[in-house]
Amino acid sequence: MKTEATKLGMPPNLQPVADNFIKNSGTFANFVMKQIKTNAQPPHVRARQEAQEADTVYRTAIRRADRERLALEDRIEATLKLLQRWEMERLRAVKDGEPPIRRPRLC
């Protein structure tokens, strides 16, 4: 079986180089064709789609973080109101001369 290099009339010392080139170019061509077939979308369409997916993930994370922030603010507000009420009771008790009431620790 003759190789492509001998068909083209190349000298025998260049034949291995030509064979390698043909093999590699065939492999490269197969690679390019696979990439073209698997990526049917143009790059700008694919980039836009990836950007939209990233934006959706970002917005979801922001909403979750905002809910956690609001829940933390509500808890802090409730704690501050409780502490203010306890302080008012303590001041009232000191004013009336009663012994202070022992409260459980918050932590």
Image (cartoon, rainbow, N blue to C red):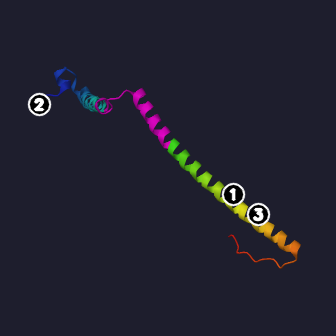
Q: Which mark is residue 77?
A: 1
Residue under circle 3?
A: 84
Q: At 70% across and 73% down in the image, what residue appears? A: 105
Say what secondary structure mark 2 lies in: loop
Q: Earlier in the sequence, mark 2 or mark 1?
A: 2
Residue under circle 2?
A: 1
The residue at the far top in this view is: 9
Instruction: Tell me where residue 77 appears, x and y as whole percent.
Output: 69, 57
Quarter of the image with the N terminus in it = top left
Callout 1 amino acid: Glu
Callout 3 amino acid: Gln
Q: At 71% across and 64% down in the image, what residue appears? A: 82
Residue range in magenta is 35-57
Magenta region includes residue 67 = no
Front residue of 29 and 24: 29
Q: Is residue 32 left or right of residue 106?
A: left
Front residue of 39 and 99: 99
Few, some or many C-alpha atoms within 10 Å of disc 2 (few <14, some 14-19, many ≥20)?
few
Q: Quadrant of residue 43?
A: top left
Q: Is residue 35 left or right of residue 6?
A: right
Alpha carbons under labels 2 and 1: distance apart: 88 Å
